[in-house]
């Protein structure tokens, strides 16, 4: 057992399952790197390499040789030697081109290919530069001018195509001009000095053509990369939309099936309850009805938690979190369930802090620990963290039933549960890990799973590391007894009669005086008739009749009473505009379906004057 935990703790990482933010640095390039790589590939484009060098260079050399032989007095043996050097250089370039296309080198191999191209180009230019040296005959102006004409044309044309790689451009220009120019200067005659001057004057022109070619090729590459990026983003967005639609369809198909079961049972129990002859039958049927309602409430709550993720991510406010305090709190919450199954729940003491929204991180770990307790029959569950660079890796390790490789690809899908192909509701709804996936993807926290059937599982989440936060005073005195205090009067503004009746009965059972209002005038009259020092707590439904909203009504109350009236907005919506509007008005949001424990806490906090959380996460 100990060996299992140590091995998992050391090796834990890239596991199967899901990785919301995979690190693939070897495939990610900056724009500069991508342009540099494409410049080198441009050296080997067919239109700039094979055709040019074998066509222009070889045919040009033959033309120069014929002119020197038939018009000038060049020695034919020297001419053939010169042609052989150029042909050999051209063949080497051709073979290099073919090898490049055959090998299709990766980006990290391109630099060596670029240097090979620069050397081959320099050798070819050097062969051309040897023309005047080999063919010039004293007193024969043709054997001087024609080779010089060939050199200038060759280097000028080569400069444009060699421009993508600067060493190739330099090798072409200098190897093509300097050897011939230096040799001509060394001859000491006016004609040869004039020829050397012409070559040297051509060098700036060759450099200008190279700079122009480099600029044009870079612009072309950047435009092509930008277009490719746009197309890739469009394809990605299209794929994301298609995946979202597929996921939504699958989600609502499963939701529809799960909700129909208790609704079907309720539709059968309702007439039976009305026609029951004795109290025993009615109590039995009523118990069944309560079970159906409880199932529906749990299903709606689970579904709303999934739907609420986007809103939670938008409202996320990262802050320093003490992982030790978080681990202790989570362990205290799950230890009773673990001990009831004979399991040991351990935490690894840590001094690490992380930078994350506390409610979202706690929600992720709650789901992971809940699964660990559920699927572990014997042994130990371990919760701990370790520093990984600038991040913290939080691990939940168990000795449970384990997950097969095939199932590890599915466990993060909605409504998928290991060992529950029959979708038994008492085993849960299969939304926990899908919530983990959505939250971690939204927060860009890498989450991974490593598991072996029969040996257990390891789930990990990586969050940014933070420094220890300074101590701050708490907003509520620990001695405040919220259990003994609660507001004495509540005004309900709810357009659904069934919800209003249920709330009224619930609040009345708590000993609270309840007033229901149907319109704005009634609400303002109730508030105006209340003592200034004992204004009631107002529960506002958000969606009212005739297009009105609870926020609109809150504005009317604010104009008349300022901030002396405590308002709570009841809504099932997760729209960011609604949440932001409530926050600006300092209104507490209570999510539907309403949980009595949350409503009771809000009313108690009102009386105690506590600074409660403005948005109910449930």
Image (spheres, grey):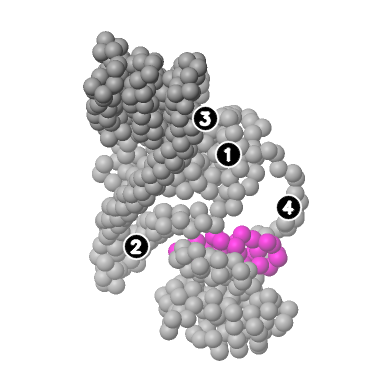
> CA separation, marks 1 and 2?
47 Å
Task: For marks 2 and 3, give the one nearer the viewer.
Answer: 3
Task: For marks 4 and 2, give the one nearer the viewer.
Answer: 4
Q: Can you identify the residue that label 1 sits on?
A: 464
> CA separation, marks 4 and 3?
31 Å
> CA separation, marks 1 and 3?
21 Å
Other residues around mark 3 within 10 Å, as few (<14) / some (14–19) / many (≥20)? some
Work out whether mark 4 precedes mark 1 in sequence or the reverse, and give the earlier one: 1
Along the horizontal axis of the image, is 188 left or right of 93? right
> CA separation, marks 2 and 3?
40 Å
Q: Position of residue 473 (x, y in %)?
A: 76, 51
User: Start and end of the magenta stretch?
Assistant: 593-616
**Secondary structure beneath label 2:** helix
Residue 171 showing in the rendered view: no
**Secondary structure beneath label 3:** strand
**Secondary structure beneath label 4:** loop
Q: Can you identify the residue that label 3 sits on?
A: 382
**Circles 4 and 3: CB atoms closer than 8 Å:** no
**Secondary structure beneath label 1:** strand
Q: Position of residue 432 (x, y in %)?
A: 41, 45
Q: Residue furthest front?
A: 139
Work out whether mark 1 precedes mark 3 in sequence or the reverse, and give the earlier one: 3
Work out whether mark 1 precedes mark 2 in sequence or the reverse, and give the earlier one: 2
Task: Decide which of 186, 530 is in the foreground and name it.
Answer: 186
User: Which mark identifies residue 474?
Assistant: 4
Q: Position of residue 41 (x, y in %)?
A: 35, 31
Residue 603: quarter of image = bottom right
For the point 36% across and 26% down, the residue is 145
Residue 527 falls within the magenta-colored stretch: no
For the point 43% across and 20% down, the residue is 180
């Amino acid at each position: 057992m100990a060996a299992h935990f140590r091995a998992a703790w050391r090796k834990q990482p890239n596991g199967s399952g899901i990785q919301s933010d995979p690190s693939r640095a070897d495939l990610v390039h900056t724009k500069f790197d991508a342009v540099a790589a494409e410049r080198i590939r441009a050296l080997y484009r067919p239109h700039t390499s094979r055709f040019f060098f074998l066509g222009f260079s070889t045919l040009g050399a033959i033309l120069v040789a014929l002119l020197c032989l038939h018009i000038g007095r060049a020695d034919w043996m020297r001419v053939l030697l010169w042609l052989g050097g150029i042909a050999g250089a051209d063949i080497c370039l051709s073979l290099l081109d073919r090898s490049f296309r055959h090998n299709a080198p990766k980006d990290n191999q391109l630099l060596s290919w670029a240097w090979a191209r620069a050397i081959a180009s320099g050798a070819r230019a050097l062969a051309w530069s040897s023309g005047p040296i080999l063919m010039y005959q004293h007193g024969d102006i043709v054997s001087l001018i024609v080779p010089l004409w060939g050199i200038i044309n060759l280097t000028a044309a080569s400069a444009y195509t060699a421009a993508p790689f600067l060493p190739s451009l330099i090798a072409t220009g200098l190897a093509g001009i300097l050897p011939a120019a230096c040799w001509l200067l060394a001859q000491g005659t006016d004609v040869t000095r004039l020829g050397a001057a012409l070559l040297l004057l051509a060098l700036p022109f060759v450099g200008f053509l190279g700079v122009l070619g480099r600029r044009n090729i870079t612009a072309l590459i950047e435009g092509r990369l930008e277009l490719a990026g746009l197309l890739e983003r469009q394809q990605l967005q299209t794929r994301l939309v298609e995946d979202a639609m597929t996921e939504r369809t699958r989600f609502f198909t499963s939701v529809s099936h799960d909700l129909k079961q208790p609704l079907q049972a309720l539709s059968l129990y309702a007439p039976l309850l009305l026609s029951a002859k004795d109290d025993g039958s009615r109590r039995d049927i009523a118990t069944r009805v309560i079970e159906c309602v409880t199932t529906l409430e749990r299903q709606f709550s689970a579904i709303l938690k999934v739907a609420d993720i986007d809103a939670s991510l938008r409202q996320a406010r990262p802050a320093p979190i003490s992982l030790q305090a978080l681990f202790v709190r989570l362990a205290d919450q799950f230890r009773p369930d673990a001990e009831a199954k004979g399991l040991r729940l351990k935490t690894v003491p840590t001094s690490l802090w992380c930078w994350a929204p506390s409610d979202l991180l706690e929600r992720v770990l709650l789901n992971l620990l809940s699964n660990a307790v559920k699927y572990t029959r014997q042994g130990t569950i371990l919760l701990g963290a370790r520093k990984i660079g600038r991040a913290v890796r939080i691990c939940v390790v168990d000795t449970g039933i384990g997950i097969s490789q095939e199932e590890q690809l599915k466990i993060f899908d909605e409504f998928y549960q290991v060992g529950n192909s029959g979708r038994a509701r008492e085993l849960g709804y299969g939304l926990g890990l899908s919530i983990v996936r959505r939250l971690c993807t939204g927060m860009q926290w890498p989450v991974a799973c490593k598991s072996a059937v029969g040996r257990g599982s390891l789930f990990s989440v990586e969050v940014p590391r933070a420094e220890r936060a300074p101590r701050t005073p708490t907003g509520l005195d620990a001695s405040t007894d919220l259990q003994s205090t609660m507001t004495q009067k509540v005004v309900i503004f709810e357009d659904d009669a069934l919800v209003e009746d249920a709330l009224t009965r619930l609040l009345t059972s708590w000993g609270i005086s309840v007033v229901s209002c149907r319109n704005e005038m009634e609400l303002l009259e109730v508030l105006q008739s209340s003592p200034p020092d004992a204004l009631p707590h107002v529960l506002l439904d958000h969606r009212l009749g005739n297009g009105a909203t609870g926020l609109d009504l809150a504005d009317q109350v604010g104009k008349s009473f300022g901030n002396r009236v405590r308002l709570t907005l009841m809504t099932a919506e997760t729209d960011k505009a609604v949440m932001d509007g409530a926050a600006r008005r300092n209104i507490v949001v209570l999510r539907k379906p309403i949980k009595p424990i949350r409503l009771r806490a809000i009313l108690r906090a009102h009386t105690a004057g506590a600074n409660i959380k403005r948005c109910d996460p449930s």
